[in-house]
Amino acid sequence: KNQVEQSPQSLIILEGKNCTLQCNYTVSPFSNLRWYKQDTGRGPVSLTIMTFSENTKSNGRYTATLDADTKQSSLHITASQLSDSASYICVVSLSYNTDKLIFGTGTRLQVFP
Amino acid sequence: EPEVTQTPSHQVTQMGQEVILRCVPISNHLYFYWYRQILGQKVEFLVSFYNNEISEKSEIFDDQFSVERPDGSNFTLKIRSTKLEDSAMYFCASSDQGEEQYFGPGTRLTVT
């Protein structure tokens, strides 16, 4: 079954600290992996998209890694800010049907001053 | 910066009633999507739409659901006879080449 699992479920950190969120997927055949940020009550906003041939991609303070062999990805947030408080969702698409995105349950990140 | 908009932001309806959720995708985009997110759960794909027809739909998207692009700018999701379990946040998304999808702010549907 095509699934995307994320850990931890929730995370609390202090402003200025770094953190790393994990994603494991069983989606096959795999096309690409995306990380989205979702503020409470809002739509997801794309942070990074990686194909199977890419193993790292950055977007400002966000750096995503991908290991297509072990089917794992991580999202590293550097020097966290209060505005980073949100859910971070790992999303995978199938190579034969890139329309249909498969979402993880997300990691709820809270950044405190 | 162009963005996807959705109306209404919150819709309350009684069980059995029909609802239409509206979306205005980004103007030059060609691919359109609807997703739903039940409170506390993951986002789920409902349907994708391209070239005036459905290109893919999930098991959730049964005969009670339909989509339409009536006038070249709006993209609507209709639920014919709402059930309590249809209560969720509904997100519209659009894409220009089927890769990066841009999501709207969502419509919260409450069925009582």
Image (cartoon, rainbow, N blue to C red):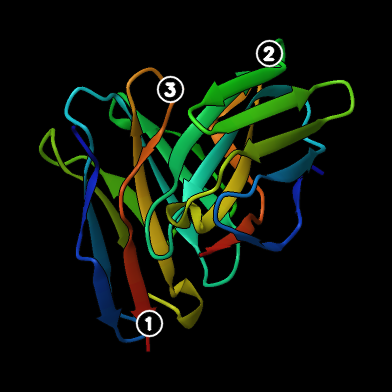
Which corner quadrant of the image does residue B53 belong to?
Answer: top left
Q: Crowding at label 3, few (<14), some or many (≥20) Cα neighbours within 10 Å? A: some
Instruction: Specify the amino acid type for callout 1.
Output: Val
**Chain where mark 1 sits:** B
Query: Quick check: marks 1 and 2 in contact, CB under 8 Å?
Result: no
Which corner quadrant of the image does residue B1 belong to?
Answer: top left
Q: Are marks 2 and 3 on the same chain?
A: no
Q: Crowding at label 1, few (<14), some or many (≥20) Cα neighbours within 10 Å? A: some
Which of label 2 and label 3 is nearer to you?
A: 2
Image position, residue B11 (x, y; %): 26, 74
Q: How far apart are labels 1 and 2 at the CA level?
A: 43 Å
Q: How far apart are labels 3 and 1 at the CA level?
A: 32 Å
Instruction: Specify the amino acid type for callout 3.
Output: Gly
Reading the image, the residue beneath label 3 is B98
Reading the image, the residue beneath label 2 is A54
Q: Crowding at label 2, few (<14), some or many (≥20) Cα neighbours within 10 Å? A: some
Reading the image, the residue beneath label 1 is B111
Of callouts 3 and 1, which one flags the residue occurring earlier in the amino acid sequence?
A: 3
Instruction: Specify the amino acid type for callout 2.
Output: Glu
Q: Secondary structure at mark 1?
A: strand
Query: Quick check: marks 3 and 1 in contact, CB under 8 Å?
Result: no
Q: How far apart are labels 2 and 3 at the CA level?
A: 19 Å
Q: Identify the mark at residue A85; answer none if there is no mark.
A: none
Residue in view at x 55 percent, y 48 percent: A80
**Chain where mark 3 sits:** B
Q: Is residue A55 above or below residue B1?
A: above
Q: Is residue A106 above or below residue B18?
A: above
Q: Residue furthest right?
A: A70
Q: Secondary structure at mark 2?
A: loop
